[in-house]
Amino acid sequence: MQEDLLELKVFVTRSKLRVKVLEKLSQNDQIATFLGDELGKNRVSISYVFRDFLKQGLVECVNPNDSN
């Protein structure tokens, strides 16, 4: 269990963008377009971070049927 948490911590902290996105998501739900605008990054970059977080079990998609 502790190893899993350490792996997640390493995964997140290896990318400054992941850290920023996770900080924003901890404050409230976000979508890639708005979060990208807020952080000065493009939507695709944020979407990749979201996808990685989903794979790691860090977030869940609240509207999986929406293509945007």
Image (spheres, grey):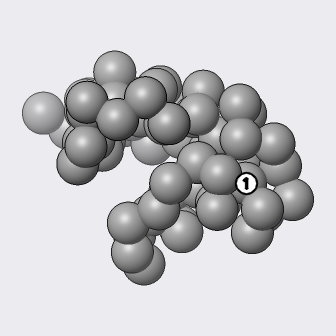
Left or right, residue 54 beside residue 35: left
In this view, which residue lies farthest toward the bottom? 27
In this view, which residue lies farthest toward the right? 40
Residue drawn at x 59%, y 55% is: 21
Residue type at tag 1: Gly
Residue drawn at x 34%, y 35% is: 66
Looking at the rendered structure, the secondary structure element under dot 1 is helix
Residue drawn at x 87%, y 59% is: 40
Q: Position of residue 22 (x, y in %)?
A: 50, 57
**Residue 43 sits in which quadrant?**
top right
Identify the residue under disc 1. 36
Residue drawn at x 81%, y 42% is: 42
Confirm whether residue 10 shows in the render.
no
Residues 65 and 9: in front is: 65
Q: Position of residue 59 (x, y in %)?
A: 30, 44
Left or right, residue 6 beside residue 62: right
In this view, which residue lies farthest toward the left? 1
